[in-house]
Amino acid sequence: MDNTEYLRPSNLKELGQIMAGHKNRATVIAGGTNLIPQMRNGGKSPELIVDIGDIQDFSFIMEDDGFISIGAATTIAEIASSDIVSTFSPILASSARELGNPLIRNRATIGGNLANASPCADTALPLLALDAVIRILSPGDKTRNVVLNNFFHGYRFTDLGKGEIITRIIFPKPDDETTGSQIKIGLRNAAAISVASIAVMLTMEGKICRKARIAAGSVAPIPMRVSRVEQLLENQEISATLLEQCKAIMKKEISPISDIRGSAEYRSYVTAVILERNIQRALS
Ligand SMILES: Cc1cc2nc3c(=O)[nH]c(=O)nc-3n(C[C@H](O)[C@H](O)[C@H](O)COP(=O)(O)OP(=O)(O)OC[C@H]3O[C@@H](n4cnc5c(N)ncnc54)[C@H](O)[C@@H]3O)c2cc1C
């Protein structure tokens, strides 16, 4: 860590210049709640750390023209206490309230949670279920949008190229017919890493489910959408029989591992249980 260079640009122009000149050796830091523990635990120290914490353009929560936009360096605490987030995406608000502990939430950012790409990243699931898109700034001041569902390529491996930075996360404001629910199972009620998590968004027309979005965490190498379960639900009346079929398909689609937090068998079982519970909650 001693040889690591540290830069803290104060605006987008300075950041652009740094990333253009150092894209091959720069590592972005936001809250540092993943990066610093990784470095302390023997991970490779970056040559150059670029701290985006002073860049005001990356810190906001905004409702505009049918969309919610959240700056990448917005903290999890800010998201947890945002009226906009609670009103239009309660599943994101509740996942933020359940992430880590108050000290972590005060520093951790939404962009860092996604870029770190852990299978248990708490904000990834509601954002997948909300059809979120992330905006990425590339060296040379180009921007591109990536659908979050295409962002996670493999275990801790994302669509981000060298020198690229997530600038904001955008998702459509759900309409009045759309409701959601999310459940995180941890080994305790607070300050727990997820053992299994599900987020659900359902658009209903009377008793018929017109659109379903199901995201699962901690049960595959990436936070994942479970499209076969979505397809099973869409254009159907949700009955007890259909829920049993969804649970069976869910178990086939996930690939949980056993680790210190739970066995693969337990994860598989509990994921099916919280899928059903989430759908029932969303419908009620
Ligand atoms: C005690 C503890 C408890 C935790 N509990 C949870 C939990 O319950 N749930 C959970 O999901 N996570 C948890 N975490 C992990 C961590 O807090 C979150 O993942 C957090 O959101 C990371 O954000 P950060 O800003 O601190 O990321 P950083 O550590 O700053 O960065 C993480 C990674 O993302 C990259 N990065 C950061 N911002 C950007 C950006 N804008 N563009 C491109 N790349 C970027 C960095 O280069 C780095 O590789 C916990 C961590 C600790 C230490």
Image (tube, rainbow, N blue to C red):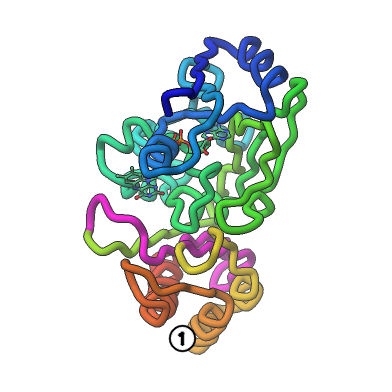
Q: Nearer the viewer, residue 43 or 216?
A: 43
**Please, what is the three-letter code of the amino acid marked with disc 1?**
Ala
Which residues, given as a range, are shown in magenta?
189-217
- Residue 39 occupies which quadrant of the picture? top left
* Residue drawn at (48%, 73%) of the image: 256
Q: Nearer the viewer, residue 39 or 204?
A: 39
* Residue drawn at (60%, 27%) of the image: 26
Q: Which residue is mark 1?
A: 240
Position of the N terminus by quadrant: top left
In the displayed orientation, state which residue is furthest to the bottom: 241
Residue 212 part of the magenta segment: yes
The main secondary structure of the magenta stretch is strand
Q: Nearer the viewer, residue 197 or 132?
A: 197
- Residue 67 occupies which quadrant of the picture? top right
Q: Position of residue 58 (x, y in %)?
A: 54, 23
Q: Position of residue 183 (x, y in %)?
A: 37, 62
Position of the C terminus by quadrant: bottom left
Indicate the quadrant of ligand 1 in the picture: top left
Q: Nearer the viewer, residue 244 or 53?
A: 53
